[in-house]
Amino acid sequence: MPRPRNFVPSQVDGATAGADNAEAEQELSSLAKRPQPLGACRKRPAFGDMTNAHTSLQKQGKKEVAKKASEIAALPQVTESDGHVVKKSLSKAASEEAPPNSDQFAKKGAIQDEEEEIDHSLTSVDQMASALNPTCSETMEVVPVDNNGQLGDPYANCEYALDIFMYMREREERYLLPDYMKDQPDITTEMRAILVDWMVEVQENFELNHETLYLAVKLLDHFLAKETTMRDRLQLIGSTAILIASKFEERCPPCVDDFLYICDDAYDRKVFLCTEKSILIALKYDINIPIAYRFLRQYAKCAQVNMETLTLARFICELTLQDYDFVQESASQLASACLFLALRMKELGGWGPTLERYSGYKDKELYPLVKKLNFMLTYKHDERLNTVYSKYSHRVFFEVAKIPPINMRKLEEALQS
């Protein structure tokens, strides 16, 4: 029965209410301390589960991540009797426990990619092309990009697309990486490749944007270029880089507890936060690093390629993240070469005047990098690093990982013709 508005509770009522609240708080604390059953997801007592990974991170997956952490720390000593390095897939373990979720995650990623192609548009493409490549003639082919429907949308940033694009082209010159691995006495390129492969799994399971993954790898490389790191801290730095990139790129980033969970509680919260601070100080808090993923999306829009060709180019570009040989390449040129190779693999022609105009790169400038990318697809497939291949072998991603690479001799002849 509701009480009247002028009702004044007595001291007895207040004491009863206080006792009830105390009992409720005691019950909640006991529930929070109650051990979770095997295979159950960890819950947060305050605001519920705020992570982006709802059901894919199970207890079994947690152990798989721990095994990969030991792999990074002790490569190449961690071996089995046959001498092969031990590596299990977190995504595979998660898919075995909850198979319907893998399709759901993949579909969501594909839908987000398709929405990106619609939402991210250019303005005044002729002006952008002339600024990037002023030597181009006015008679070159023009890509019809209609932005009139989005000019009134303040979130589309159509009026500033040219300025943003040119600003990123200028900034990428300041973020060219040196050959830093020669100054790292305790880590190798193989350890870095295993770490990046694990970071791709984290991006999949947390359902993060691809920009977050690319930026996290950039943060990792730039930090390693400035600080000498031991192998036992490599996974800590990689997971912290994903946390920083998530705060920069995501609308609802995962919290620190999520990253402690996927690291199998190998680090405590204080160490994790100190590492985050160390990375930001080493990079002078300047983390808006240009990434190849954004350039690739803009070039594909100018060329008006279909989604399958763009996905193939993204697959090639994502493979370069774990290959140290591509660390020193600029983001815009790497994106151009990935799209060039994808066009050749789909037999859609070469680097025409339209792409040359809008990217600022001529086809001959891209030949060495295109051949290097095709060599990676043909000969450098490591059986231990299958995350990117399995990800892009899904039907939602058009199974582009199953497309055979071009024969090196045929590619050479095609480029020279």
Image (cartoon, rainbow, N blue to C red):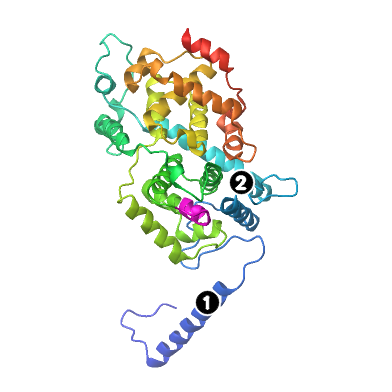
Q: Amino acid at mark 2?
A: Ser
Q: Residues within 10 Å of mark 1 (few under 14, many from 20)?
A: few
Is residue 64 at least partly visible in the picture?
Answer: yes
What residue is at 68 percent from the left and 48 percent from the top? Answer: 96
Is residue 151 at least partly visible in the picture?
Answer: no
Under circle 1, the secondary element is: helix
Magenta segment main secondary structure = helix
What residue is at 34 percent from the left and 22 percent from the top? Answer: 359
Q: Position of residue 406 (x, y in %)?
A: 57, 18
Picture quarter containing residue 364? top left
Please report the bounds of the magenta region as a residue range: 229-239
| Direction right: furthest residue | 81
What residue is at 43 percent from the left and 85 percent from the top? Answer: 18
Q: Is residue 412 above or below residue 390?
A: above
Give the labeled residue for mark 2: 91
Q: Position of residue 15 (x, y in %)?
A: 43, 90
Residue 284 included in the magenta stretch of the image: no
Q: Is residue 3 above or below residue 38?
A: below
Q: Is residue 175 above or below residue 369?
A: below
Q: Position of residue 116 (x, y in %)?
A: 41, 34
What residue is at 55 percent from the left and 53 percent from the top? Answer: 54
**148 or 204: which is nearer to us?**
204
Q: Amino acid at mark 1?
A: Ser
